[in-house]
Amino acid sequence: MTPSPSPRTLEKLAAARRVAVLTGAGISAESGVPTFRGADGLWRRYRAEDLATPQAFARDPRLVWEWYDWRRQLIAKVEPNAGHLALARLEARCPDFSLITQNVDGLHPKAGSRRLVELHGNIWRLRCTAEQRTLVDARVPLPELPPRCPTCQALARPDVVWFGEALPQAVLEAAFEAAREAEVFLVVGTAAVVQPAASLPLTAKRAGAYVIEVNLEPTPISSSVDESLFAPAGEVLPLLIP
């Protein structure tokens, strides 16, 4: 049975003018986004940690892009769920809103969210390895592997943060600023263990925010937040954001 948010939580969220949200893989899993380890075929022989690295790309860019192109084709078939749509509604009515996501699947913008802080990048963007500029290419499958920058013809890489790479400083600063300024902070579909994202809810709490957790099961921050709602985001968020 889906837990009902407390009246205090509903009042806090309805009255807040500054809201920040952190989302993780759980919200996308409800839409059917597969994990990045392939269940069959070629990808059985590789670990994600062996493909999503600068070293792997330098060694064999085509192999890395075959894996990303396969992932893009799977994600292209997936639609945002009720949780994604509820967060887009919240953004539309909240004067100061930030949606900080660890996901790279692009489902939040597909649902209508615009004020995004994408901590780990976006699988639908490419980045030129020479000029470092980004471009959007949503073609599925990509017509050329590995793809190249249309301007200078240098190799393009996925515009995502790989294992061993630091998060972009400007993105990280935007996330922590949003956490410090929020009146209400929602944590949705994340185990709250991967740093530095796991620090955001506690940063918000220390700054005075009312923190709401939505997850399938308890996490390391559950004892520190104001309310935890243990159920799928697609069920809970429409109750929080009708």
Image (tube, grey):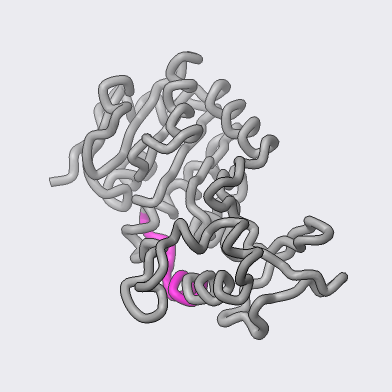
Q: Number of callouts in the render?
A: 0
At horizontal 33% and vertical 39% (from top left) the residue drawn is: 191
x, y percentage for residue 239?
Answer: 30, 43
Q: Is 113 a magenta residue?
A: no
x, y percentage for residue 8?
Answer: 30, 22
Instruction: Please tell me whether residue 144 is drawn above or below residue 6 in the rendered image.
Output: below
x, y percentage for residue 146?
Answer: 66, 76
> Could one spot residue 125 in this view of the protein?
yes
At horizontal 29% and vertical 29% (from top left) the residue drawn is: 220
Q: Is 80 a magenta residue?
A: yes
Magenta stretch: give its range. Answer: 72-82
At horizontal 33% and vertical 23% (from top left) the residue drawn is: 225
133 horizontally vs 224: left or right: right
- Seen from this angle, which residue lies furthest bottom? 143
At horizontal 12% and vertical 46% (from top left) the residue drawn is: 1
x, y percentage for residue 219?
Answer: 27, 33
Q: Nearer the viewer, residue 154 or 193?
A: 154
Instruction: Please tell me whether residue 222 is drawn above or below residue 53 in the rendered image.
Output: above
Q: Nearer the viewer, residue 139 or 62?
A: 62
> Could one spot residue 116 in this view of the protein?
no
- The picture quadrant where one finds residue 40 is bottom left
Instruction: Please tell me whether residue 241 is drawn above or below residue 204 in the rendered image.
Output: below
- Seen from this angle, which residue lies furthest front? 59
Q: Nearer the viewer, residue 50 or 157?
A: 50
- Seen from this angle, which residue lies furthest right? 152
92 horizontally vs 128: left or right: left
